[in-house]
Amino acid sequence: MISQPVAIYASTLLNLFATREIESILRSMPVQKFVCSVAASEVLYLRHEEADHVPELISINPLVEHGLLTLTSPESPEEEALFVQFAAKIDDGEAMSLALCVSRGYALATDDRKARRIAASVAEPIPLVATSELLFHWAQSNNISPERIREVLAAVELRARFRPWPEYPLREWWNRMLMI
């Protein structure tokens, strides 16, 4: 697990919201957790379990109010310049998250393949964390039953429409847990 502050990107936050365990997952992370203002504005809705229902409105505000997440934005001309540089290659939320990670020494929690490639290619590669790693750590540190892990992973796949790709971290664990 990571040992430095982590910026969590919107898609990863959506995956965590989909679990209905986001507070417990964030509490299990022994580091400060940040979300940049642009990424926060992208976290709005999750699919409902029932196909004919309207999407579920979600908000990070309670997580911020309880101190589980800290909202942040670029605070210097250098961070703004990095943001603009990354925004030429990826969407604004990922770009701002990457800029803050480079500038402040944060790790980045993202499942976006392009953002992961860019993060690994900067002069000092940004430590990366995947949804699977966050869920694995949460399950291990809280002694979560295999049945509950299966429910959580299935919820991520259904509500956030996320499935690990072939080279994804802990993909074998993810698939094995879904079979329980």
Image (cartoon, rainbow, N blue to C red):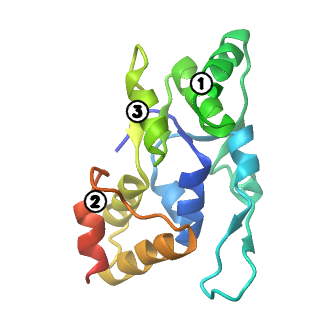
Q: Residue at x 34, y 84 (%)?
A: 147
User: Going from the N terminus, do you reach mark 2 or mark 1 first?
Assistant: 1
Which residue position is annotated with label 3?
117
Within 10 Å of disc 2 (Cα), the crowding (few <14, some 14-19, many 20+) is: some
| Residue 108 percent across, percent down from the top left | 49, 37
Q: CA distance from mark 2 to mark 1?
A: 28 Å
**Residue to which mark 2 is pinned:** 171
Q: Point out residue 176 in the picture as x, y percentages from the top left corner.
A: 23, 73
Residue at left offset 57%, top offset 53% = 11
The amino acid type of the residue labelled 1 equals: Phe
Q: Quadrant of the C terminus?
A: bottom left
**Residue that sits furthest to the top in the current view:** 77
Classed neighbour count for the residue bearing mark 3: other residues with Cα under 10 Å, few (<14), some (14–19), many (≥20):
few
Q: Residue 86 got which mark?
A: 1
Task: Report which quarter residue 138 is drawn in.
Answer: bottom left
Q: In the rendering, at what x and y percent does residue 115 appear?
A: 49, 36
Q: Specify the amino acid type for callout 3.
A: Arg
Q: Earlier in the sequence, mark 3 or mark 2?
A: 3
Q: Report the Cα–Cα distance between label 3 and label 1.
A: 12 Å
Viewer-proximal residue, 153 or 158?
Answer: 158
Image depth: mark 2 or mark 1 in front: 1
Label disc, if present, on residue 22 of the rendered structure: none
Residues marked 2 and 1 touching at CB (< 8 Å): no
Residue 101 x/y as whole percent: 54, 27
Q: Is residue 64 positioned above or below 75 on the image?
A: below
Secondary structure under tag 3 reads helix
Q: Disc 3 versus disc 2: distance between alpha carbons?
A: 18 Å
The secondary structure type at the circle numbered 1 is helix
| Along the line of sight, the residue nearer the viewer: 69 or 96 | 96
Q: Residue at x 41, y 44 (%)?
A: 129
